[in-house]
Image (cartoon, helix red, strand yellow):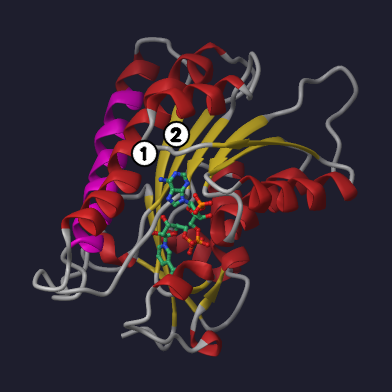
């Protein structure tokens, strides 16, 4: 566990979806770097498990149960960061493999809500603290998906949700660039777009059985998050040579080619 030099303030991150999968892996990585992490998600028991693992390793974690589509819950989550905030990582999400004929209104609302309203409410409420914190740049990272740019009849809801989340990140990035030009804190915005990852995400999707040996691992997505926080100028070209595993492809996946702040990664077997 890295500890900040004495006298320096610990960096703080709020991570949504942190009770399981990619969000949990990001929390573990940032905590291991010496960050204080605030864990968001609806199930308190899942958050507590991750927080306990971090504390056993000597790290600092706070677990705040709540729904990212509910403004009052997001207020509690962001407040738990305390006075300073250095990163917001929005990993909460849900998905499905359903055609429009199979997709019902509830599933549509839940999937689009967590990706888009969740991204909006968390960023909106995190920004005052991110902007007010000093000591280096801030970060907003959206965990999007290859589905953010794909077209598949069974992702009419999920693909639309993740596509909108990606566009949210791109629009927000342009606002943050303008703010920094006017003298505000530089807040880097990235969209990380993984292909299939072996996480509990798939346990709720009976329409598709994944093959774990042909998937990314949650920690490999967390690795990308760590890299862009350490070096916000990282691009697919700079990350590809240092990727954690030979089988991982990091390149300018279509249709994300023109955006440096979109980092897509996939297992080499991914179609
Ligand atoms: N697994 C993949 O193949 C894959 C590929 C590309 C992108 N992604 C994206 O990666 C992100 C993380 O997914 P994962 O693979 O790590 O799956 P996961 O293990 O199911 O994690 C998703 C987390 O989001 C939380 N969550 C869902 N709805 C929420 C809400 N309304 N409010 C607060 N928290 C909510 C869930 O916890 P609670 O149920 O306790 O709230 C869960 O811990 C998602 O955005 C997903 O779209 C996943």
Residue 195 in percent (x, y) is at 39, 72
Q: Please state if 218 lies on the left or on the right of 109 as rendered.
A: right
Residue 234 in percent (x, y) is at 49, 50
Q: Is any part of residue 257 visible from this angle?
A: no
Q: Nearer the viewer, residue 116 or 193?
A: 116
Residue 93 in percent (x, y) is at 40, 54
Q: Nearer the viewer, residue 203 or 10?
A: 203
Q: Is any part of residue 172 visible from this angle?
A: yes
Q: Is residue 261 magenta?
A: no
Q: Nearer the viewer, residue 40 or 130?
A: 40
Q: What residue does disc 2 label?
A: 188
Q: Is residue 166 magenta?
A: yes
The region drawn magenta spans 157-177
- At x 66%, y 30%, the residue is 12
In the picture, residue 182 is in which quadrant?
top left
Residue 43 in percent (x, y) is at 58, 48
Q: Please state if 159 lies on the left or on the right of 242 as rendered.
A: left
In the picture, residue 71 is in which quadrant?
top left
Q: What residue does disc 1 label?
A: 118
Question: In the image, is residue 197 above or below residue 131?
Answer: below
Task: Respond yes or no on whether mark 1 lies under 8 Å from ligand 1.
Answer: yes
In the picture, residue 254 is in which quadrant?
bottom left
- At x 32%, y 32%, the residue is 120
Q: Nearer the viewer, residue 153 or 171?
A: 153
For label 1, the crowd category at 10 Å Cα-Cα, with few meaning under 14, some 14 to 19 and many 20 or more, is many
Question: Dot 2: what SS?
Answer: strand
Question: Dot 1: what SS?
Answer: helix
**What secondary structure prevails in the magenta region?**
helix
Q: CA distance from mark 1 to mark 2?
A: 19 Å
């Amino acid at each position: 566990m890295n500890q900040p030099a004495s006298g320096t303030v610990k960096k703080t991150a709020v991570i949504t979806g942190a009770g399981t999968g990619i969000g949990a892996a990001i929390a573990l990585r940032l905590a291991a770097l010496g960050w204080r992490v605030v864990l968001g998600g609806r199930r308190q028991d899942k958050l507590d498990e991750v927080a306990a693992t971090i504390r056993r390793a000597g790290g600092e974690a706070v677990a705040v149960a709540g729904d990212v589509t509910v403004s009052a819950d997001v207020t509690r989550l962001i407040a738990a960061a305390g006075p300073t905030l250095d990163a917001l990582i929005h990993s909460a999400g849900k998905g499905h493999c359903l055609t429009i004929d199979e997709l019902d209104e509830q599933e549509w609302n839940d999937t689009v809500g967590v990706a888009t309203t969740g991204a909006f409410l968390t960023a909106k409420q995190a920004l005052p603290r991110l902007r007010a914190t000093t000591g280096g740049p801030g970060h907003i990272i959206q965990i999007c998906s290859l589905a953010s740019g794909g077209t598949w009849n069974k992702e009419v809801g999920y693909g639309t949700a993740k596509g909108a989340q990606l566009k949210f990140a791109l629009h927000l990035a342009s606002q943050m660039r303008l703010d920094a030009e006017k003298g505000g804190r530089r807040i880097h915005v990235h969209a990380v777009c993984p292909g299939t990852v072996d996480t509990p995400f798939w346990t709720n999707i009976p329409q598709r059985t994944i093959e774990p040996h042909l998937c990314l691992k949650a920690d490999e997505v967390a690795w990308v998050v760590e890299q862009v926080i350490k070096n916000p100028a990282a691009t697919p070209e700079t990350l590809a040579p240092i990727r954690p595993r030979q089988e991982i492809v990091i390149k300018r996946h279509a249709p994300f080619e023109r955006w440096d702040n979109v980092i897509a990664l996939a297992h080499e077997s991914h179609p």
